[in-house]
Amino acid sequence: QVHLVESGGGLVQAGGSLRLSCAASRNIFTIAAMEWYRQAPGKQRELVATITRGGSTTIVDPVKGRFSISRDNAPNTVYLQMNNLKPEDTGVYYCKAVMANYSPSWWGQGTQVTVSS
């Protein structure tokens, strides 16, 4: 079982930056991958970024060059740095722990990001 707590969301003007944090209740190196998703109002939840246990990262095209994902194993935390934010980045951002061996994934409760134009 993994308990995830996201933080760092808020209201920001277009062009601004936010850093989201996802604190895990266990050593993140025991987790196959950590991912950030977002869900805009009326839309499906979509993948934003992934970091694997080995440190490989993937950023989806709509946010490539503006967002980055990183981790710090000391506090078992994964970060999503978001720069040059746009109104279309508005949504609830969720952290997900992807477990190995087809074990169930775990989700955080989400943090709201609102970008004003």
Image (cartoon, rainbow, N blue to C red):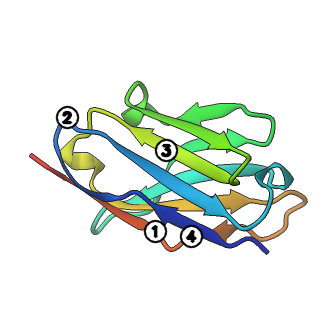
> Residue placed at 53% from the left, 52% from the top?
36
Q: In what element is the residue under mark 3? A: strand
Residue of label 2: 15
The three-letter code of the residue at mark 1 reads Gly
Residue of label 4: 108
Height in image: 101 above or below 33? Answer: below
The three-letter code of the residue at mark 4 reads Gly
Location of residue 100 by image quarter: bottom right
The three-letter code of the residue at mark 2 reads Gly
Q: Position of residue 111 (x, y in %)?
A: 40, 65
Mark 1 burial class by Cα count in 10 Å: few <14, some 14-19, many 20+:
many
The three-letter code of the residue at mark 3 reads Leu
Q: CA distance from mark 2 to mark 4?
A: 27 Å
Disc 4, disc 1: CB below 8 Å?
yes
Residue of label 3: 80
Looking at this view, is 99 or 68 the one in front?
68
Height in image: 56 above or below 109? Answer: above
Q: In what element is the residue under mark 1? A: loop
Q: In what element is the residue under mark 4? A: loop
Q: Mark 2 vs mark 1: which is more N-terminal?
A: 2
> Residue placed at 68% from the left, 73% from the top?
3
Q: CA distance from mark 2 to mark 1?
A: 22 Å
Q: CA distance from mark 4 to mark 1?
A: 6 Å
Q: Which mark is residue 110?
A: 1
Mark 3 burial class by Cα count in 10 Å: few <14, some 14-19, many 20+:
many
Q: Is residue 17 left or right of residue 60?
A: left
Height in image: 26 above or below 56? Answer: below
Which residue is farthest top? 65
Height in image: 71 above or below 75? Answer: above
